[in-house]
Amino acid sequence: MKILVTDDNEHKELIKELEQQGHEITVTNNLGSDHLRKTFENQPEICIHLLQAKDNKESKEKPLSFMEANVIGTINLLEQCKKHNTKLIMLGNPEKQKNPKTPYDASTASAELYAFSYANTYEFPIKFIENLNNIKTVLSTI
């Protein structure tokens, strides 16, 4: 199966495991719309979205860059997944995002809520997972 993983080299073990299972893996850490258009030419069947800007302290100093990375990047990804009918597995839980305390928290909550809204609005296949221990179970159900 062709799988696109958005990652910044934090999940090397997961990627190695997916490759050992025989999946064709493409990894990107660029969620820019032009880059994603080119990446999706490979026609991934599943996208596992793990990439997000993470530094809480830096998010307080540069909140706009976190909004762009986490929210706009996720929307770019959602648009490509929708266009190519690619199933999405996303780390997070939009139902738990209620009281963000930092710009980082707000940006990840917003990204998850956008993904949840795509699932509802477009009847789009998204599975949310709260930790990577669930990834095998989720892959087996798709």
Image (tube, grey):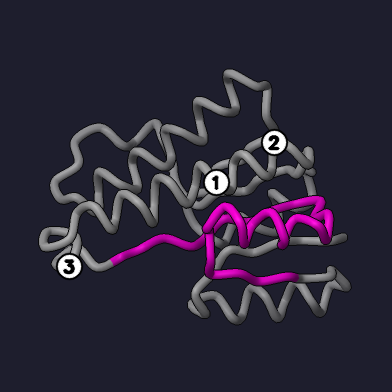
- Determine which quarter of the picture holds residue 1: bottom right
Q: Which mark is residue 58?
A: 3
Give left or right: position of 118 versus 67. right
Q: Check if residue 34 falls in the magenta segment.
A: yes
Secondary structure under tag 3 reads: helix
* Amino acid type indicated by mark 2: Lys
Q: Residues within 10 Å of mark 2 (few under 14, many from 20)?
A: some
CA separation in Å, label 2 and label 3: 32 Å
CA separation in Å, label 1 and label 2: 10 Å
Residues 5 and 127: in front is 5
* Amino acid type indicated by mark 1: Asn
CA separation in Å, label 3 and label 1: 23 Å
Tag 2 near tag 3, CB within 8 Å = no
Q: Residues within 10 Å of mark 3 (few under 14, many from 20)?
A: some
**Mark 1 / mark 2, whichever is N-terminal:** 1
Q: Residue at x 55, y 61 (%)?
A: 132
**Mark 2 / mark 3, whichever is N-terminal:** 3
User: Label 2 belongs to which residue?
Assistant: 82
Please provide the residue range marked out in magenta.
26-54
Secondary structure under tag 2 reads: helix
**From the viewer's perspective, is residue 41 above or below residue 120?**
below
User: Label 1 belongs to which residue?
Assistant: 76
